Image (spheres, rainbow, N blue to C red):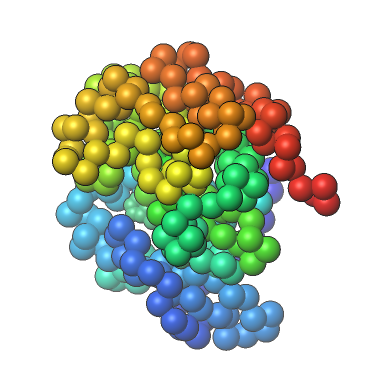
Amino acid sequence: ARDRPTREWHLFDFDIGRPLGKGKFGRVYMVRTKTEPHYILALKCLYKSEIVQSRVEKQIRREIEIQQNLRHPNVLRLYGYFHDEKRIFLMLEFAGKGELYKQLTKHGCFTEKRSARYIDQMADALIYLHSKHVIHRDIKPENLLLGINGELKIGDFGWSVHAPGNRRKTLCGTLDYLPPEMVEGKEHSEKVDYWALGVLTYEFIVGSPPFEDLTGYNATYKRIAKVDLKIPNKVSPEARDLITKLLQYDPEKRLPLTEVRKHPWIMRYKSKSS
Ligand SMILES: COc1ccc(C(=O)Nc2ccccc2)cc1NC(=O)CCSc1ncnc(N)c1Br
């Protein structure tokens, strides 16, 4: 198809606003285009020196290609990018209600109604990403954002890959969301995102991830590999059922995302309006 003309962007096209947070590789600012129409964006600034050093240059180019073609209401848009001699700038959709984990920290945990609506939106976004052969691999509250109407947006893609992947994920981040097959360094598929959705469901309702073991890394490892799952009594039977169906050791036994969207716990809270 004829490529849509994308204009060249430069830093001087924008008024720079407040910092939005520190990503894994750089700083993000709220910005506005200087000329009409005044678009509000999140501009992520990455330093080439850091990128070249950590050899993620190839990764980021692949990232950008993948993401410029993603369009889904629950996936944060990457509109485009530009660079100067020292930096690469990612032009991102601005999520009006900011970082979801800040809400989770503030409230401790979410109601089952709010959790079910978020999980339904996550499942919808993951069905879309998997249809594009993108496995997210890093689903956790820190990577989720909220749009201006409170809708969930998968907001960060530092580690998504094209399926099937078994690139060792440098275990710098938390282990809590890793499924047994990744913890054991085995080949993994998009089913890793099914597992992470189960972990997310648990964490939204309970307020902490299911295999967290503050005594350390190896303790969490063991609990994941054994699927040592204890669900508190406060969790409703329907939520318990969904969590158990997602946190299955065998990836093939995990509930498909289309079934998640039809699960009684999700259906019970589907907003009448939408
Ligand atoms: C599509 O979103 C991305 C796509 C790609 C990358 C990225 O860094 N890729 C990458 C960087 C280096 C190496 C390999 C991959 C990051 C993001 N997203 C982000 O960084 C989120 C910034 S925080 C924020 N954003 C909007 N509204 C808010 N209110 C906030 Br707070």
| Picture mark count | 0
Residue 156 visible in the snapshot: no
State whether residue 241 is above or below residue 178. Answer: above
Residue 243, horizontal then vertical, whole percent: 51, 29
Foreground residue among 44 and 121? 121
Q: Which of the image's four quarters has the N terminus? A: top right
Residue at image position (48%, 14%) is 252
Would you place residue 144 above or below residue 116 in this image? below
Q: Nearer the viewer, residue 59 or 171?
A: 171
Instruction: Examine the rendered structure and indicate whether residue 236 appears above or below residue 10.
Output: above
Question: Residue 107's x, y, as percent?
Answer: 48, 60
For the point 21% across and 43% down, the residue is: 214
- From this view, report whether residue 80 is shown above or below residue 68: below
**Ligand 1 location (quadrant):** bottom left
Indicate left or right for 234 with 249 as reference.
right
Residue 169 placement (x, y as % from top left): 27, 36
Residue placed furthest toward the front: 233
Task: Say which of 183 and 52 sits in front.
Answer: 183
The residue at the point 27 percent across, 27 percent down is 223
* Left or right, 93 with reference to 113: left
- Relative horizontal placement of residue 42, taking residue 178 as reference (left or right): right
Residue at 41% x, 14% y: name it. 250
Q: Is residue 49 visible?
A: yes
The image shows residue 159 at horizontal and vertical percentages of: 36, 43
